[in-house]
Image (cartoon, rainbow, N blue to C red):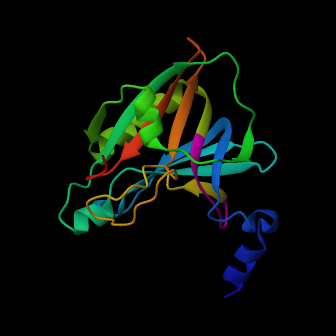
């Protein structure tokens, strides 16, 4: 019980922002793939950034759909990449988001999605991380024993989830210094169009 009480007191200025759609930005601090004795329980990859005044913030990326796996559907994550260029990096921090909609992004870009088994998706993320100088991500804010965002994927109905949210999608963008390019990764599950 004392542990729960301690968690409630941590980050009190951010508690009211739980569930808020945000965009976060900052330099890479650390990253790690989830581990477990049972591979079916591994479904996250965590990237920690230095997000300005709030300090360290975790971006929780889904790398496998346990819901789809348990329901007999394809558990792989589909990834689409939207390339761009940049001249100035965004400010570091946590900012309110008006929402992100994959349909809007796809209407302006040709996006091809490829299915990734969890280990290959982890390798793809590590490759991007090792090359990037800055990270920006969209998702739903949370404050627990650390600050972070999750729901960094399409929120439309899928094979295993009937809830359908429009304009609440999440994504991550990696900025590369060597050629001033950036890549936004869009994540979809089985059944999301």
Most extreme residue toward the left is 72
Q: Main secondary structure of the magenta part?
A: strand
Identify the residue at horizontal 71%, vertical 85% (top origin): 2
Task: Point out residue 49 in the picture as x, y percentages from the top left corner.
Answer: 65, 42
Q: Foreground: 124 or 87?
A: 87
Left or right of residue 112, residue 98 in this image: right
Q: Which residues are magenta?
A: 137-146
Residue 156 in the image: above or below residue 90: below
Question: Is residue 38 at least partly visible in the picture?
Answer: no
Residue 57 located within the stretch drawn in magenta:
no
Q: Measured along the vertical axis of the image, is residue 146 above or below residue 181?
A: below
Query: What is the residue that sits farthest to the top in this orientation?
Result: 179
Would you say 193 lies left or right of 106 here? left
At x 44%, y 49%, the residue is 153
**Does residue 84 appear left or right of residue 53 in this picture?**
left
**Where residue 170 sits in the image (x, y, percent)?**
51, 47
Q: Viewed as shown, does residue 51 lie left or right of 42?
A: right
Q: Name the residue: 33% across, 66% down.
A: 162
Quadrant position of residue 41: bottom left
At 81% across and 64% down in the image, what residue appears?
A: 13
Q: On the rendered image, what quadrant is the N terminus found in?
A: bottom right
- Vertical comparison of 112 with 15: above or below: above
């Amino acid at each position: 019980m004392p542990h729960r009480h301690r968690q409630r007191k941590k980050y009190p200025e951010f508690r009211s922002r739980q569930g808020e759609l945000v965009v976060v930005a900052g330099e890479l601090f650390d990253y790690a793939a989830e581990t477990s004795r049972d591979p079916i329980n591994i479904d996250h990859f965590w990237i920690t950034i230095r997000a300005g005044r709030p300090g360290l913030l975790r971006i929780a990326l889904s790398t496998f759909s346990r819901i789809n796996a348990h329901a007999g559907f394809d558990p792989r994550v589909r990834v689409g990449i939207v390339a761009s260029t940049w001249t100035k990096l965004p400010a570091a921090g946590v900012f309110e988001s008006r929402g992100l909609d994959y349909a809007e992004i796809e209407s302006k870009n040709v996006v091809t999605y490829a299915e990734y088994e969890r280990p290959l998706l982890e390798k793809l993320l590590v490759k991007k991380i090792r090359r990037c100088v800055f990270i920006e991500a969209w998702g739903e804010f949370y404050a627990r024993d650390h600050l972070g965002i999750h729901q960094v994927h399409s929120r439309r109905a899928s094979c295993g989830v009937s809830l359908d949210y429009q304009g609440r999608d999440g994504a991550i963008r990696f900025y590369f210094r060597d050629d001033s390019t950036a890549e936004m990764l869009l994540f979809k599950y089985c059944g999301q169009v």
